[in-house]
Image (cartoon, rainbow, N blue to C red):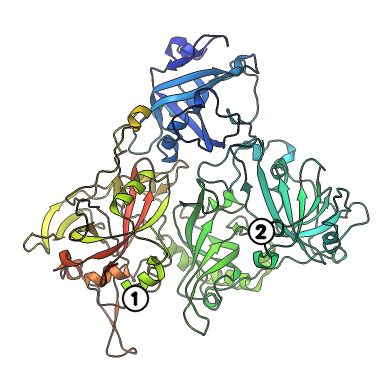
Amino acid sequence: MAEGGETASAFSPLLGAATTAVRSLLCQGPVAVFSVERCRRDPSSGGGLLRDCGLLPEADLYDVSLSDGHWLLRATLRPPLNPLVRRNELRCGCELEQLLLGVEYDERRASAGCRLFVVVEARVVANGDGAPSPLLKETRCRKLQDLNDEAGRWAGPDLPLRARRRSYLPLWDNSDYYGDVWFPESNNDHPPAPSQHPKGAGSICLRQLEGCISQKRIDHPPVLVRILRKCRLCHYGRPDRYAECPFQAKFLAADKSGMATLVLWNSFCMDWYRHLEPGMVIQLYNYVVKESYATRMGQDPGLTMEPALELNLNTRNPAADITIFNDPSGNAEWQVPPLQYTFVTRKELSQLRPGDQCDVIGLVTFAGRQERIRSQEHAGEFVVYRWVHLTDGTAPEPFVLKLFSTCQPEIQAQIYPCSISDNTVTFLVCTNVRVEGKVVDASGQTMCPHLFSTKYSQVFINGHHRGKLYVKNPKVKEFIQWIRTTKDKERERLSKTPIGGCYSFPPLPCNERNFRNEVLGVSTLTTMWELKQLLEQLDYREYRRVTVQGHICCVKYKSLGTDGGEEVLVFKPGVTGSTGKRAGVTESPVVDRSYQGTGRSRSPEIPIIRTSQSQKTTPSPRQMRSRKGLTYRKRPAQMRLNESTESSEGETDVTQKRTCSENTVVDPTPKQGLNGELSLDTIFLPTDPRSDHRDLWPAKHDNSFINVLAHGGLSLRQDGGSNAEIEELPPQPPGDVLSPVCGLEKMLFIFVLDVCSQGSSRVEVALNRAYVQHHAL
């Protein structure tokens, strides 16, 4: 019995024998959430309280660990509560009230562990500062008793409660491994000691195995290969199929005669995926030979860039085996190709064509926040990415890298710029990245070149470079020499580098005609009612870009870089002399306390729209079904500033800092020719070419308000009488930029909005571009 007695526990009615008649319990006191974990359901998951939920069958189930301060209880959320997790409202550290638990019994087991708990209803206690529940802090100091198994018979990693799966999935994507089952405490956590010599005799080469594809043999001779590339993990679990460990991992391997794809299946992935790395020489036994997946699907392997040969390894039928060899100098007798790299400098990047692949190394000068977009291949799933800037000293512009999930989630989570705490700069290697951009002329120059990580990309940062073969590459050596000569200077500059924030790349076109041709042709306009629905349906960290048309009915300027936070009404139809007229003073943005004193760059908060789901506390599922949706104002109003958003991993999201401290709130309302009923507040953060990491190719224009909206920011240059004459413009006060706004109410605009959910019902809406329409759409 926990201290305080049985009556002090919110779970008291559940205590006792397994044959108790209790079928449901309304917990009277608050309950802290210890963890939230996700798994893919299977055909056995829909019985009992999970049946007939009034919603379409969802692919995911969520298990939560709850504590009342004395007991620890694990339960499954009823699917109608799943949106609370997808919006990051019900998360680790939060508190629940009015918790209604359902109790079911697994008749296949007759013990205390046969009881299954289901969270039927719950109300999340709102905690605006994102701090964990005080109850959670108190219970961490105690040894809690497990209410699911009072006898304490179970020991080992927690497994999904209502699905026959051997592991949970990450909350926000399917590309990373997750949970203790991937990190066993036994000696099996380490790969077998490397061998010096191949086992046995009679090895076969890959070219010879290509002739065995049509044979259904399972006793092929061993094959010796070098791993060249490692693919990110794939989860293929489906709700309509049983599969305890539905994982697949691919490696690209080669010997003297050719290449093949190695495919690891199911629990064999858990045994070997983390231990196999590019550069290793391995010998394979008991594998199955097949044609590549692309070939079996009727695709041309030459177009898919995949080998025609596939070697499959599993734990049974037959039980595959792998032997790793020491290869410090590349044993010539083994006749396997060396691991090669194709490093390019930033100066050389513009000479590459879109689709080319290369490797890069550089100092991290910007690390963006994690965002998610919906997968085009698998409905209902998300792809996670973040933007990273790298500089290598060969060009003033950085590498711009869109970094998706890789096979190294632990390293990827540590990517940040300069760390003041240990006085080091961070340099990063990213392999197998793909060049993106567009070719602008016959010379082959690529405009706005940037990089996408691929499924075979790997990342390495400080502490992970030792022993890697790329350290001997000539361009890596040149970069290291540059680091040694400029380290102190770069450290000082990087101590002020931005982290997180609203960021998009490549920059949009600077005029309406090019935008119509390049973007609007493949991205349709969104109505305001459709935008209303989209804002309510966004999941946590989900990013969307939408295009709407309308009129500007109000412009307000506010200085975000000063403590006073003065707000000035610049333009509003019907207000005489509104330009420069003081409309009032509001409080300055909320300071993110977690970043004080770290030396990292502080940033102004982007205002957050709160949808109709926003309330002081989260309603019950019955109340959720009666929600109306986001309420749009018929008259524009300044959006509220909210506190910084803290993710479930403890990562605080801050927007980027700038010398350009002004922001302009632009309110698009439909008027003549449009419905004129809805309006939306958004914020415009113009780029400043003097210090803004977003402004990599500063444009030339006259800094009129219309041009600032179309170009996304200010300009320090404008064209003179000829192309050779460029006039440097001095910094302009915000009033000079915003003053010529007469006639805005007569102009019809195309607005490009970057929308991102910040959790719960908070949605960030930032104006990327605004183009004056010269021709009707």
Is 203 placed above or below 111 here?
A: below
Q: Evaluate whether residue 43 shows in this view.
A: yes
Secondary element type, mark 2? loop
Is 300 placed above or below 286 here?
A: below
Q: Residues within 10 Å of mark 2 (few under 14, many from 20)?
A: few
Quadrant (top left/top right/bottom left/bottom right) for the C terminus: bottom left
Q: Indicate left or right for 667 with 122 as reference.
A: left
User: Sequence order check: which comes first, mark 2 or mark 1?
Assistant: 2
**Labels 2, 1: front one:** 1
Q: Residue at x 51, y 64 (%)?
A: 363
As drawn, the label of residue 466 is 2
Q: In this view, which residue lies farthest toward the left? A: 576
Q: Quadrant of residue 707?
A: bottom left
- Residues 684 and 602: in front is 684
Amino acid type of the residue tagged 2 in the rendering: Arg
Q: Quadrant of residue 771?
A: bottom left
Give percent across and percent down for residue 600: 40, 55
Q: Residues within 10 Å of mark 1 (few under 14, many from 20)?
A: some
Say which residue label 1 marks.
Answer: 699
Is 745 placed above or below 1 here?
A: below
